[in-house]
Image: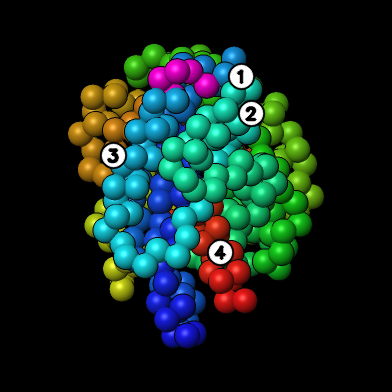
Amino acid sequence: MRRDRDKMKYAVIDMGTNVFAALVAEQGASGCCWKGEYKVAARLGDGGLVHGQLSEPAFVSAHTALEKIFEWLQSYEDLASVRAYATSAFREAANGPQLQQILRQHFSIPIEIISGDREAELIAKGILAAVPELPSSALLMDIGGGSCEFILLRHKKIAWKCSFPLGMARILERFQPSDPIQPATIAAMRAYCREVLQPLQRIIDQEQPQCLVGSSGSFETFRDLLYPTHQRISDPEFVPSVTLDRPTLEKMFQDLIRSKREERMQLRCMTPVRVDFIVLAAVFTQLVLDLLPAGIQIKQSSFSLKEGAMVSLLEEAMY
């Protein structure tokens, strides 16, 4: 009986603001055995996150994205459960619960709108699965479409966490940058973000973290642009984390900031859903680096919310 249960596969869906991402895994002898992942553009921010309402096109886009995910999930047999976690756009839009209910009824799956704190906890759990060796003080950073999460780990335990409404879809809507982005827009964006991030600045000054770990889509794109690979999470040789050289990273930021959309579309590993947000993510990440100690180590984690949620789900399944 136990052996059959261990062969059961589980699916987790991260319903983010820009992208819906699905992950399938099963419990292996040494922990999670990753079977595959699938990502599809959702673009829930199109039409107005700043105004506190998801647009009608966002409702359609969310439905289409989940349809594509369920088509992909059909290739997996013995799925014991499918769980979905909805984040910033759902929890902060007045009609987010309405979209949750529509999707839950149509696809017959549990969809949980999680708080910023819960999102940060799952992100931390995912990152620790990818980067088990960390110094005594580490800052985790996850750039989303609707929000950005920061978590301070002290000896691998959460000592502080905060979700800021600074997702790249929100920044795009607020500042509407030209192509290429202009210095005045960068200055305005930095001033606005620096003001919102004052609680982060205080915790950095207090804790002096020795390592920054960036996760989720933007950091995955940074990694792919610097170290192109074609590995999938299900590949036996998959490496879930790399160390990023700060001067090389900052040079890439400047190249992205000077680029036009058409030029970015020609870059290897640049996905259409990321092309409009990656410049803003570069500006934002550079700002965060400016707040941190000069010699800080920088790592990238391919694991984030959905991997953390999967680890939690498989731990539950063991009991």
Q: Position of residue 20 (x, y in %)?
A: 42, 41
Q: Amino acid at mark 3?
A: Met
Q: Are marks 1 and 2 in contact (CB under 8 Å)?
A: yes
Dots 3, 2 in contact, CB < 8 A:
no
Give the SS element for disc 3.
loop
Q: Is residue 293 above or below residue 273?
A: below
Q: How far apart are labels 3 and 4 at the CA level?
A: 31 Å
Nearer the camera: disc 2 or disc 4: 4
Q: Earlier in the sequence, mark 3 or mark 4?
A: 3
Q: Secondary structure at mark 1?
A: loop
**Rendered residue at 44%/24% (across/down):** 58
Viewer-nearest residue: 223 or 273: 273
- The answer to which of marks 1 and 2 sits earlier in the sequence is 1
- Label 3 or label 2, whichever comes before in sequence order: 2
Per the model, the C-alpha gap separating discs 1 and 3 is: 30 Å
Mark 1 is surrounded, within 10 Å at the Cα level, by few (under 14), some (14 to 19) or many (20 or more) other residues, namely few
Where residue 6 sits, quadrant-wise, is bottom left
Q: Nearer the viewer, residue 287 or 317?
A: 317
Please state which amino acid type lies under the numbered disc 1: Gly
Viewer-nearest of discs 3 and 4: 4
Q: Nearer the viewer, mark 1 or mark 4?
A: 4
- Residue 261 location (% of width, % of height): 29, 24
Residue named by callout 1 = 52
Q: Is residue 169 left or right of residue 251?
A: right
Q: Residues within 10 Å of mark 2 (few under 14, many from 20)?
A: many
Q: Secondary structure at mark 2?
A: helix
**Residue that numbered label 2 is attached to:** 92
Quarter-wise, where is residue 295 in the image? Answer: bottom right
Q: Residue at x 57, y 28 (%)?
A: 98
Q: Position of residue 126 (x, y in %)?
A: 54, 60
Query: Which residue is disc 4 drawn over?
Result: 313
